[in-house]
Amino acid sequence: MTLRGAGDGLALHGAGAPLRLLLVAEPTTDTALVLVLLTNRFPHAFLELQVEVGQAAALARLAEDPFDVVLVHVPQHRAPGAAAAEEVRAAHPATPLLIVTGSTDSDMTLWARVDGAQAMVSALPGDRAEDRALRYLDLARGLLDAQDAPTCAVDPEGRIVAVNLAWRDVTGRNGGTDELCGVGVSYLDTCDRADLDRRGSGTPDAAIVVGGLRRVLAGTLELFRHDYAWRSPDESRWFRVQVTSATINGGRGAVITHLDTTNVREIEQTLAYQSMHDALTDLPNRALLVDRLEQAICDADRRGLGVAVAHLDLTNFERVNHRVQYSGGDRVLVQVAQRLLAQLRPGDTLARVSGDEFLVLWRDLDLDDPEEVLALGAGLVTALEQPFGAADLPVPVTGSVGVARHVTGRDPERTLSAARLALADAKTRGPRSVALFTQELEEAVIGRTTLETELRKALAGNVTQFVLHYQPVVDLTTGTVVAVESLVRWEHPVLGRVGPDRFIPMAEATGLIHVLGGWVLDQAVRDAVAMTHEGRELDVAVNFSVLQLNDDAVRQVQQVLETSGLRAGRLMIEVTESAFVEDEDAVVRTLEALSQLGVNVAIDDFGTGYSSLHYLRRYPINTIKIDREFVAGIGTNVDDEAICESIVGLAAAVGAATIAEGVETAEQYAFLHSLGCQHGQGFLWSRPVPVDQLGAAIAACGDVPVASARSRTSRTSRTSRTSAGPRTPR
Ligand code: C2E
Ligand code: CA
Ligand code: CA
């Protein structure tokens, strides 16, 4: 006889081969009960139980057919069974032995026999078929009642055959549908009736539910689901009714649950709101603005009116965060949002799209007048004029705005990127600027982005598109070349030569300056090692962007000096004056560290930036370079001459040397020399040339006549600049 655990309808499953057990039975043994006992003990095992009655048969079986476990039924106080156990143990000492005992057939205990001792493994109390059936029913009911969702089971005719506690609870409370509590009531009829007087019943979807149930019962649907709102005068809740097919009373019935989904819905709604709004300011986010923009465009097209968007970016908001902490920054942002909102008309939208960026959507505009649109943008900027408050501090905030008008037929996203382009344009004009997107702007930007892509490519793989040219620096007294300035050139295979005035600012804006600057430094220092003139070593000047002035630069300079062997004193770093305006501690630190290394520091383009005296005193500067703009005015402009003179005087006062840039004529040379300016560079001696032409270029410098005695040449008084105010840096 073979009994499979699963054959009894009990859950006996497991992977792989079944565990084989041999039951050494008495003629009276209830093998089914033994199986129940086993499955209670080992609920997850897949058991195969073989039965042999009597010890002789069992031993014979065991001799030819090994088992994993042997079970011996030992009816209590009955010796034969016990003897059988001892014999089996003796014959198969390695096989685990379990003993089943019981005073009656329905009271069984499972013992493990281990080295003569016994341990109880499992016990099964009195258990008859009816008891078992009742137990399973209890279990089923317990499971049903444990469910929060009101649940009932209906038979193939749609009559309720069982309900759970929650069902009883809910139907009992909600008057009207009381009868649904009752087992035996037709769910179908009740719902039909509810549908008839739906106005009063609060279950207006009853007809739909009944339809679903009928289909499940008919077998055309396995699962039916329907969401409905249930409203009473003081409450509104959402339910999901779910009908699943089930075998009830031997036919195709169904289990119906009514799940209260109100909380889930509320969470869903909150999530939906959150996915469209900014948590800090509660303003719409970008997604919602785009949605509204699309609507506004449809609307505007119908009504013949225009739509415009603005992109606003707060200037240096990191500084605000730095000053008043992030919490203070958050408070300022909320105030900014409120001020901006006050500028809008009903129907317009303000969205916060990132930390310090906002978008505005204006509808119903007359777009023919660009001034009107610009004025709207300007309104946003002026709204920020009064300082904000955080942590009891007045916090000034400024912003730039780009405005774009929507063009009929255009993708809304393009209008948004047009506003962003206009913003980029506004930013180049400084804070508080407003710019309107135009076709020309787009073309300029496209040109710029192509160049930017090319620059990225050129710096990514190889730097062979870049080359350094060198311009000799001449001692004005002796006329000999003492140094060279390295000037980077970009030879693009298709675009041709791109000037540094175009790509250096781009490299700075994109962060590529670090790669480029590193290469320039490396190359210039390597070239410089071998540079001599008339047996004298030449110094080399390298231009540094202010962005490069960080601790990294110091390490880099130190390393390149070490590997190349160039003496630190032969290297000069040129930094434009604007670098000092930011007054960043990092800049000071870097310059000090460089000067500690023995490297020379020069201020480039001196006089074109802001008041410089302060920096001259504070920072370790050896050299000042007079900007070529002033040199160009020598002989024609008294102001320029005066500026040249005062720069030389200033330098002398702080112990710095001067180099005049852009010297093109003998007159300029003579004048600068007469002022006491030590060095000069310019086309008069040589243009910047590639390193292989530098020898010849330096030799040619010797052909330029040395300026005579150090005496004042004619001071010009012919013309004067109309404005002698501060120059803007180029
Ligand atoms: P800068 O440092 O003021 O360089 C001097 C510029 O004046 C060079 O322009 C040079 O070719 C030009 N120049 C020299 N002699 C004369 C002259 O007699 N007359 C006239 N009219 N111009 C003269 P370039 O090479 O176009 O460089 C422009 C700027 O690009 C440089 O101005 C510098 O600020 C920047 N730059 C060049 N190379 C580098 C570099 O490697 N790194 C960084 N950060 N900037 C660089
Ligand atoms: Ca320079
Ligand atoms: Ca310069």
Image: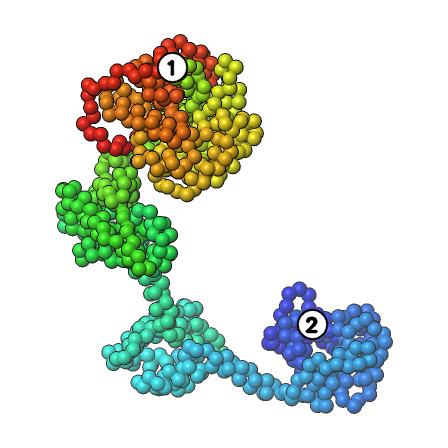
Residue found at x 68% / y 65%: 17
- Name the quarter where the C terminus is drawn: top left
Picture coordinates of residue 486, whole percent (x, y):
43, 24
Q: Secondary structure at mark 1?
A: loop
* 444 w.r.t. 115: above or below: above
* 185 w.r.t. 679: above or below: below
Picture coordinates of residue 387, whole percent (x, y):
25, 53
Picture coordinates of residue 478, whole percent (x, y):
42, 14
Count of marks overlaid on the render? 2
In this rendering, position of residue 202 left or right of residue 79: left
Disc 2: which residue: 48
Estimate how packed mark 2 is, as few (under 14), some (14 to 19) or many (20 or more) residues with alpha carbons within 10 Å: some
In this rendering, position of residue 324 left or right of residue 294: right
In this rendering, position of residue 366 left or right of residue 162: left
The three-letter code of the residue at mark 2 reads Glu
Q: CA distance from mark 2 to mark 1?
A: 105 Å
Residue found at x 44% / y 72%: 245
- Name the quarter where the N terminus is drawn: bottom right
Residue found at x 37% / y 10%: 705
Estimate how packed mark 1 is, as few (under 14), some (14 to 19) or many (20 or more) residues with alpha carbons within 10 Å: many
Picture coordinates of residue 367, whole percent (x, y):
16, 44
Q: Secondary structure at mark 2?
A: strand
2 or 1: mark nearer the eye: 1
Quadrant of the rendered structure where residue 447 is? top left
Disc 1: which residue: 685
Closer to the chain start, of discs 2 and 1, is 2
Camera sees residue 477: yes
| Closer to the camera in the image, 557 or 201 | 557
| Closer to the camera in the image, 391 or 597 | 597
The three-letter code of the residue at mark 1 reads Trp
Residue 45 bears which disc, if any? none
